Image (cartoon, coloured by chain):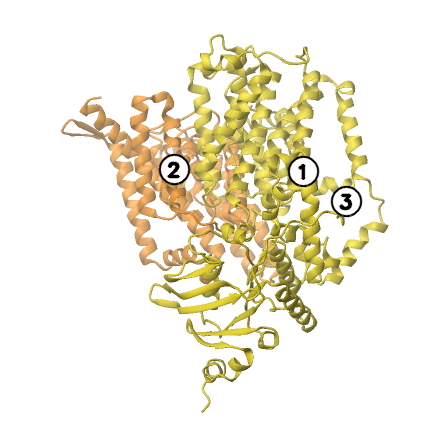
Chain colours: A orange, B yellow
Amino acid sequence: MDFQIALLLGQDGITNGAIYALLALALVLVFAVTRVIFIPQGEFVAYGALTLVMIQAGTVPATVWLLLGAGVLAAALDARQALHAGDPGRLVRLAGWYVAYPLALVALLYALPVKDLPMAAQILLALAVVVPLGPLMYRLVYQPIAAAPVLILLIVSVAVHVGMVGLGLLFFGAEGSRTPPFSEARFDVGPLMISGQTIWVVASSLVLIVGLYQFFGRTLYGKALRATAINRVGARLMGISPALAGRLTFFLAALIGALSGVLIAPITTIYYDTGFLIGLKGFVGAIVGGLASYPIAAAGALLVGLLESFSSFWASAHKEVIVFTLIIPVLLWRSLKGRHVEEEE
Amino acid sequence: MKPVGMKPVEMKAVAAKPEGKTPLLSSRLVLGVFIVALAAAPLALSPFYVTLLNYIGLYALVALGLVLLTGVGGLTSFGQAAFVGLGAYTTAVLTTATALPPWLAWAGGSPWLALVVGLVFTATVALVLGALTLRLSGHYLPLGTIAWGISLYFLFGTLETLGGHTGLTGVPAIQVFGFELDQGEELYYLIWLFLLAAVFTTQNLLDSREGRAIRALKGGMVMAEAMGVNTARSRMIIFVIAALHACASGWLYAHLQRFVNPTPFGLHIGIEYLFMAVVGGAGQVWGALVGAGVITIAKQWLQDILPKIFGQSGNFEVIFFGLMMIVILQRARDGLWPLFARLVPVRATRRELDANAAALPRKSLPQQGDVILEAKAVTRKFGGLVANNNMSLSVRAGEILALIGPNGAGKSTMFNQISGVDTPTSGEVLFLGRPVAGHDSREIARMGMSRTFQHVKLLPLMSVLENVAIGAHLRGDKGVLASAWRMDRAEEARLLAEAARQIERVGLAEHMFEAAGSLALGQQRILEIARALAADPCLLLLDEPAAGLRFKEKQALAELLKKLRGEGIGILLVEHDMDFVMGLVDRVVVMEFGQKIAEGLPEEVQQNPAVLEAYLGGVE
C-alpha cells in the first residue's frame, strides 16, 4: 500500500465513520433515555435513503402509507384513552396530528411535481415522511411496555427490526439504488482528491453533533431528556413525562437515521436491508463507549469506519468478520473492568 | 422482586378451587398419549407433514436451549443459529473431506464421531464467547451474540474449505447399528428421540440443586451469591447447554438435508429461534415445542399466501412475525404455552418429601462463649462522608447482639462491612479469626455466616420449600450431569428434607408448597431466616427481621431466636423495634452518626443519657 491509497482509504473510512458516529450517538441517546436498545436505527437509514429515491423517481413513496396507517392506529389508541378521561378536545388535536398530517403529506406528494423539485425540497419531503415514524413507533410499540426489563425491550426491538425489513422489501423491492450526489465538486488537496459528497457528509455530521450538543446543553427539552437519562423517576416527579421524553428521543433518533441515509445514498448503493449492517456498525461504536459516553461512542464509530475501509483493502472477503470481531476485545476489556455481581432490573 | 401482600387464607381458597371442577388428567397419561402419537405420526401422515415435523423437532431442540437460557436464566442469545452452523459444518467437513489433517483423521467419515467432535468444538467456542460476555450486565450478551452471529455467518460463507456460499454436498446418512437413516421418516425417530431426551434432561436439571441455582439467575443473583451459588458458573452452564442443543440440531440437520450452506445459520434465523422460544413461553420447557411448531407452520402457510396477496415474492412472513412478537410481548409475556396447558388440564404433582432421608452432615459449632465475629476499629468513608467511624463490636457463639440506632446512623453500612458486601476504608472484620474483606459473598457463606436481607430477596414464583432449599446449596455437591440424569435423587431428598425441617422450625410448615411470593411480608422475612438456617451457619446476620410482623409472630420469632441461641449459634440483629430487642437480646450496641455511643446490657443502655439524647432529643 502506498501513501496515496492509504489517504484514499482514510478518507473513505472517515466518511463512513462520520455516519456510524451519528448513529452511535442516536443509539446512546435512545438507550440512556428509554433503556431501549434501538436495533431498528439502521432501518431508518434505509427508509430515509430509499424514500428519497422514490421521490426522485417521481413516485409517491410507499412509506407515507405506513405513516398514515401508524397514525390512524395511534389516534385510535389515544382516542380511547381520551374518551375514558372525558376530554373530547384532545380527540381533535390527536386527529390533527396523527391523521391530518399524513393525509396532508399524501396530498402534497400527489399534487407537487416531486420529480422536478430541487433536491433540497425532495430531501425535506423524504424527511417529513420518515422522521415522524420514530415518535409513532415509540407510541405504538414501546410506550405500552416502557417499564419492561431491558431484555424484553431488546427482543421487541429485534421484532421491530425484522418487521421493518420485511416492509422495506415490500415498499422498495429487492433492487438497490443510489441517489445523485449533492454536489459534483471535487477538490484537490495535495495528492488527495476530496469529493464534494465527502465534505457534505463530514460537515453535516459535525453540524448535527454540535447541534445536538447545543440542544442538550441549552434548551429546556434537551435538559429534560438528560434528566430522564440520569434518573427516570426523579425526572418524572419533576413533571417530565416519560412518554414525551420517549417520543422526543425517538424523533431525534429517526431524524439522525433518515438524514444519515440521505447523506450516504450517493456514496453507497442502498438496499432495503442495508440499514441493519450500517446500524450495527454504529452499535459497535456505541458499545465501545459503553452505551453511556457520547464522545467515546463517536470515536469508536470513527475507528470502526477506518477499520472497515482498511480491512476491505487487505482482506475484503473478511471485512465484516473483522469489524464485528472488534467488539470482542472491547467486551473483554469491559468485562475485566467490572467485577461485581449485580442484579439486573 | 416485589413481595405480594396477599393473605395466605385467600391463597388457599384459590388453590383449592380446581379440584372439584374439571377432572384433571395424570401427567404421565398425557405424556404417554403424546409419545404414542409421535411414534405413530410417520405411519399416518404424508411425507410433507413428516418433513414438517422433522423441522419442528430440529427447531424445538434449539428453542429448548433458549428457553433455558432466556426464559429461565434471563440471558439472551441471537446467535444460536451460528451454533447450529458449527454442528452442521463440523459433521459436513468431517464426513465429506477427502484429506483431513493427520491429527483429525481419526474422526473422518463417521457421523457419530463427528457429533462428538462437534459438541466438544461447540462447547469450547461457547466457553470462550461466554467468558468474554457473560460477566457483563444483561444487554451486552445479546449484542455480543448478534456480532459473533454475523461474524460466524460471514466466515461460513468465505472460507474455502467450507465451500463458500455454495456449501458442502454429499453428506452421508447416519447409520444406527448398520441401518442407514436415509429417509426423512427414518431420521424422524432420531430427531424426536434427541428432542425428548433434551426435554426430559432439561426438566430434571431444573428440578435439582443446580436447577434452583439456575432459576435464581433471573432476579435473584445477589441472594443466590449470598447463599453460596456461583452465579457466573450457572450462567456459563446454561449458555453451554443451549449451545450444545443447537449443535446437536445442526448435526441432525446436516444429515437430514445431506448438504450444508451458510443460509440457515444467519442472524435472521437466530432471531427466529429466539422468537420461537418467546412465542412458546420462554420459561416453559414444553413451550419450546409449541413455539417451534407455531412458527414453523405459520411460516409455511404465510410463505404460500403472502406473495399472492402482495403480488411479489419475498420474505414477507417476517412482517407478520415481527408484529406477532410485539403483540405477544405487550399482551402475553408468558407466551402461548399457558393457553395450551389450559386445554389439557394436567394434575400438578406435589413434591413428595422423604421423611426418612438421612440428615445432612453439620459443621461443628464453635464453643459456646467463643468470640466468632470481631469488628476492629472499622471506618468506612464515602468521599468526605464518614458512614462508620472507628466501630468495634464482637459477637460470641450462643449470644444475641443487637445493633440499634436512629435512621442514618450507619447501621446498614456496618452490616455491609460485616457481611463482606463492602470493604472498610480502615480497620478489619474477623470471622472465626479470618478477615472477611477480600472474600466474596460465596466464600463468606461457606465459612458459616448466613444472612437475611433488609429488603426481602426471594424468588416469588418458586415454592417456599425450594426457596429455602437454595439456602442449603453449599451442603450438596451433585452437578449438572447427575441432575440431568436423575443420579442426584438421594442427595436431593436430603436437601429438601433439611429445607422442610427448617420451614417447620420457623413455623411456616403449612405454606411449604405455596409460591413464596404469595406469603405476607412478615412471613417472607421468616422464610429468609429458614433459608439462612438451611445453610447450617454458626453466625446469623438478621437485617430488621421483625419489621412487618404481627405481635404473635414477633413472639414466635423471639422464641425461635432464643432456641437458636441455646444451640450455640451467634446472632447479630439490626433492628428498630425496641420492645422486640430489649426483651430478647444479650447485649446492645447503639450507633449514631457512624459511631458507637453506647454498648452493654439492654437495661444499661436504656438508662444511658447519650442513647436517650439520640432517640428522644435533648432533655432540657
Residue picked out by circle 2 = A284
Whether residue B30 sits left or right of residue B77 in the image: it is right
Instruction: Tell me the crowding category of disc 2: few under 14, some 14 to 19, or many 20 or more residues within 10 angstroms, Cα based.
Output: many
Q: Position of residue B131 (x, y in %)?
A: 45, 37
Task: Please report, as a chain letter, where disc 3 is located.
Answer: B
Q: Are marks 2 and 3 on the same chain?
A: no
Residue, x 35% and y 29% (percent of image)?
Answer: A179
Q: Position of residue B38 (x, y in %)?
A: 75, 26
Q: Amino acid at mark 2?
A: Val
Residue picked out by circle 1 = B203
Residue pushed farthest front? B367
Q: Secondary structure at mark 2?
A: helix
Q: Are marks 1 and 2 on the same chain?
A: no
Instruction: Tell me the crowding category of disc 1: few under 14, some 14 to 19, or many 20 or more residues within 10 angstroms, Cα based.
Output: some
- The residue nearer to you, when weighing B172 against A138, is B172
Q: Amino acid at mark 3?
A: Thr
Q: Count up the numbered dots.
A: 3
Residue, x 77% and y 54% (percent of image)?
Answer: B15
